[in-house]
């Protein structure tokens, strides 16, 4: 009969192999350790989003590092990678990529009555951007309200009754003159 390993036990083995690679004797060289780290990063990317472009590497006595890049399967918030390396970027800036800023500026803005949280439904008829705001029930209800619209008509977004949506979801409709953007803090209401 085979050995039956729990998820916690497997996690422990992977953790030890990544952080103390010589303990088990299997990863007895720098190259084997870096190859293992690269393969584990690829497995996480395959299941959680992101992609590995280059192998893991180490400079001097510094810890080994692996670069993770964003891709279509990665959640917009950065997924499992979002809390790590806050200075790093998941997406390289592509000068040919569509600019999401105008669709947010021209989108429908709301603030929540209870806490002032900002929600922006982008005027994005190309499907590049998703609704901006705290990931909670209000965001889901706002998305659902817009999905109910007849999106086959070319001017469907302009015909949305924003006042009705705001009333139903306990939101305040933000007027165009109140929309602001700051490079440090992002979108906000004046």
Image (cartoon, rainbow, N blue to C red):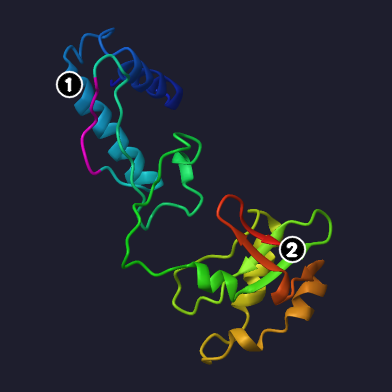
The residue under the point 24% across, 16% down is 60
Q: How far is disc 1 from disc 2 in space, using C-alphas?
A: 55 Å
Task: Identify the residue at image location x=74%, y=63%.
Answer: 190
Q: Is residue 95 above or below residue 88?
A: below
> Is residue 102 rendered magenta in the image?
no
- In the rendering, which numbered label is found on residue 163? none
Q: Quadrant of the N terminus?
A: top left
User: In the rendering, at what x and y percent does residue 178 appear?
Assistant: 73, 69
Residue 48 is situated, as x and y percent measured from the top left of the image, at: 40, 45
SS at mark 1? helix
Give the mark nearer the N terminus: 1 vs 2.
1
> Is residue 11 depicted above or below 165 in this figure?
above
Q: Residue 69 versus residue 106: which sits nearer the camera? A: 106
**Res 37 quadrant in image:** top left
Query: Which secondary structure type mostly characterizes the magenta part of the structure?
Result: loop
Depicted 64 relative to depicted 138: above or below: above
Residue 35 vs residue 10: left or right? left
Residue position for label 1: 32
The quarter holding residue 151 reads bottom right
Neighbor class of circle 2 (other Cα within 10 Å; few <14, some 14-19, many 20+) is few
As helix, strand or loop, the secondary structure at mark 2 comes to loop
Q: Nearer the viewer, residue 14 or 180?
A: 180
User: What is the span of residues highlighted in magenta in the rendered image?
Assistant: 53-59
Q: Position of residue 18 (x, y in %)?
A: 32, 20
Task: Return the mark for residue 190.
Answer: 2
């Amino acid at each position: 009969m085979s050995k039956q390993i729990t998820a916690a036990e497997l996690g422990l083995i992977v953790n030890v192999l990544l952080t103390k690679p010589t303990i088990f004797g299997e990863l007895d060289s720098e190259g084997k350790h870096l190859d293992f780290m690269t393969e584990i990063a690829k497995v996480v990317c395959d299941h959680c989003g992101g992609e590995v472009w280059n192998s893991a590497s180490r400079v001097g006595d510094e810890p080994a590092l692996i670069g993770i890049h964003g891709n279509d399967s990665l959640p917009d918030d950065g997924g499992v990678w979002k809390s790590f390396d806050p200075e790093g970027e998941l997406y390289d800036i592509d000068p040919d990529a569509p600019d999401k800023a105008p669709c947010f500026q021209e989108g429908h803005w709301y603030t929540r009555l209870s806490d002032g949280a900002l929600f922006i439904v982008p005027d994005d008829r190309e499907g590049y951007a998703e609704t901006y705001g705290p990931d909670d029930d209000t965001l889901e209800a706002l998305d659902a309200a817009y999905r109910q619209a007849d999106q086959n008509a070319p001017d469907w977004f302009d015909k949305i009754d924003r006042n009705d949506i705001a009333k139903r979801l306990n939101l305040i409709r933000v007027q165009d003159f109140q929309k602001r953007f700051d490079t440090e803090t992002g979108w906000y209401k004046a």
